[in-house]
Image: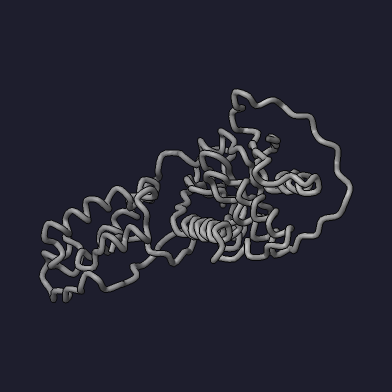
Amino acid sequence: MHSLRFDGTFATWRQAARRALLQGLAPHQLQWLDEEAAPGLFDQPAERAPEPNGRLRVSPELLELLESAAQYCGEERWSLLYRVLWRFVQGERSAVLAGDPDGSELHRRLKAVRREAHHLHAFVRFQPSKAQGAPDFVAWFEPAHDILASASGHFAERLGKHSWLIATPRDGVFWDGQRLQHERHCPVQWQAWARQPEDDGQALWRAYYGSTFNPARLNRTVMQQHLPVRFWKHLPEGPLIPQLMSEARAGAQRDGQALVLAGRKGKRIAQINEGDAVRPPSGSVSGSDAPDLPR
């Protein structure tokens, strides 16, 4: 068994994979070790093998697929990529097809990565920062996969010359108005700025979402598909969601508007069936049109 330790980036994995392919090392002969992973009991630091001679041709399309799938965090994160690459180089083009076991897993990971990038765009909430030296806006996010570097350019196109940063438990990005800086290990200062106490504007968020929530349109299953529970704690309206859902189940669904408005005089909005899909308004600083409310 050959243990290949690298820095956990796709670029260095690609170099190590190229050397392994030219040496004729099959997938079952390799163990991929991220440098941040704790060494095993019998893991001995290996000397760097000499660069093998030879040329290796791999299509740009395959490399693009592998680079996207490398953002997935999970078991066999790197070994699956090498197995697909090995089989493809050996002439098994089916290794990248959805009907193949390896190809099916590859496409599942690609879908999960795209989904998490959508979550970043939909559920990041920037707050204006008052700290000295901090950018104009800051946000905290906890992605399930390493999508921050590739997906955060979305905000540079929308916030213009404003400076901003997004900090996560692992990495972080900083936009100074002209250039996007990505740090694989998020600086402590960035994390402190991003996790600052919420400002007065957050109360306005909660008042807005609480008053526009329609209990008659609540569909718990659909809501949690579009807005997973793990994101609630980082949204201004997140603390309201359980309460609003509870009130809806307790009888508020007969009203077609928020409880605070339902008791006032005026024409009652007709109840809508639970299965009806209605997109609630979005007020995110990011400009996303993703659903933000329970429905």
**Residue 114 appears in the figure:** no
Tell me: residue 276, above or below residue 186. below
Q: Toward the viewer: 101 or 207? A: 101
Q: Is 171 placed above or below 288 here?
A: above
Q: Is residue 89 visible?
A: yes
Residue 161 rendering spot, x and y as whole percentages:
62, 57
Number of on-image labels: 0
Residue 284: x and y in percent read: 43, 59
Quarter location, residue 41: top right
Residue lying at 36% horizontally and 67% vertically, measured from the top left: 281
Res 254 → quadrant: bottom left
Q: Position of residue 49 (x, y in %)?
A: 82, 35
Of the 4 image quadrants, the one containing the N terminus is: top right
Position of the C terminus, as image quadrant, is: bottom left
In the picture, measured across the screen, residue 175 lies left or right of residue 105, that is right
Task: Name the residue at 19% across, 67% down.
Answer: 216
Q: For residue 94, what is the image quadrant? A: bottom right
Q: Position of residue 153 (x, y in %)?
A: 61, 58
Q: Residue at x 58, y 46 (%)?
A: 77
Q: Residue furthest top?
A: 41
Image-based side of 128 in relation to 47, left or right:
left
> Would residue 20 be found to the left or right of residue 264 on screen?
right
Q: Nearer the viewer, residue 66 or 284?
A: 66
Give the vertical position of 124 relative to 214 (above or below). Answer: above
Foreground of the two, 193 or 4: 4
Q: Residue at x 62, y 46 (%)?
A: 79
Left-right relation of 110 to 87:
left
Q: How is the image coloured?
A: one colour
